[in-house]
Image: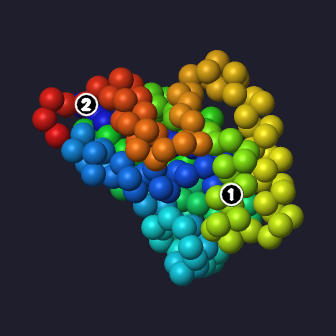
Amino acid sequence: MPGNLIYLMGPSGSGKDSLIEAARHSLAERGCEVMRRVITRSAESVGEDAQGVSAQAFEALKEQGAFALHWQAHGLSYGITTLLDDYLRQGRHVLVNGSRAHLEQARQRYPDLVAVMLCVSTEVLHERLLKRGRETPEQIRQRLQRNQLFLEGMPRHEAEAIKVLDNSGSLTVVVQGLLALIDHGVDYPASA
């Protein structure tokens, strides 16, 4: 029986990378793989454990059919390799750090995916963006505005069958929330 795709989304700075890293062991115990993204950002950049490639290399991979999913956001290109499909065919579940803007395209390819949205208060997001030091003050201002619009649109997510987790507090609590959502949204085998 094929596995399920858990499609994690959230604004930049919402803590997706921290959540994934903190939950990695528990996800593995449940038979869930965590996909590493290919990003047109330097491998030395601060942030997630991703494969950094040049824009030219990304386009070449895309032309070769190396990606199951790919999108652009914030001036960067993101890809999830076709290893995703291999895992799903093997009956493994897979978590990807996806894009809200790409959700509908992902659902077209994987109609049974479990969509999970990570949200964070604007105040907490502001602190996190300042700490990580990747954005200019103007970029931070724009991200905070987008986050506020995102929070105002939260009722829409429930209508779109998106499970929502608030990551404004303790990482331990949000990890437990993610695992509970996945346990109830994905039919895991009895033994992983």
Q: Is mark 1 on a helix, strand or loop?
A: helix
**Sequence-first tag of 2 and 1:** 1
Residue 18 lies, with reference to residue 175, above or below; the image says below
Which amino acid does the dot numbered 2 rest on? Tyr
Residue 43 left/right relative to 145: left
Query: Residue at position x 56%, y 73% from top?
Result: 46
Nearest the viewer among 83 and 162 is 162
Q: Mark 1 points at which residue?
A: 127
Work out how far the residue at label 2 is from the one at label 1, CA to CA, in angstroms: 37 Å
Q: Is mark 2 on a helix, strand or loop?
A: loop
Camera-side mark, 2 or 1: 1
Residue 128 lies, with reference to residue 187, above or below; the image says below
Can residue 138 be seen by looking at this rendering? yes
Residue 104 lies, with reference to residue 78, above or below; the image says above
Q: In which quarter of the image is residue 166?
A: top right
Which amino acid does the dot numbered 1 rest on? Glu
Query: Residue at position x 68%, y 57% from top?
Result: 127
Q: How many labels does the image show?
A: 2
Query: Residue at position x 46%, y 31% from top?
Result: 114
Nearest the viewer among 121 and 79 is 121
Query: Residue at position x 58%, y 76% from top?
Result: 45
Q: Indicate the quadrant containing the N terminus: top left, top right, bottom left or bottom right.
A: top left
Residue 10 lies, with reference to residue 104, above or below; the image says below
Q: Indicate the quadrant containing the C terminus: top left, top right, bottom left or bottom right.
A: top left
Residue 152, image x, y percentages: 78, 30
- Coloring scheme of the render? rainbow
Can residue 85 be seen by looking at this rendering? no
Neighbourhood count class around disc 2 (C-alpha, 10 Å): few under 14, some 14–19, many 20 upward: some
Q: Quadrant of residue 137?
A: bottom right
Residue 145 left/right relative to 89: right
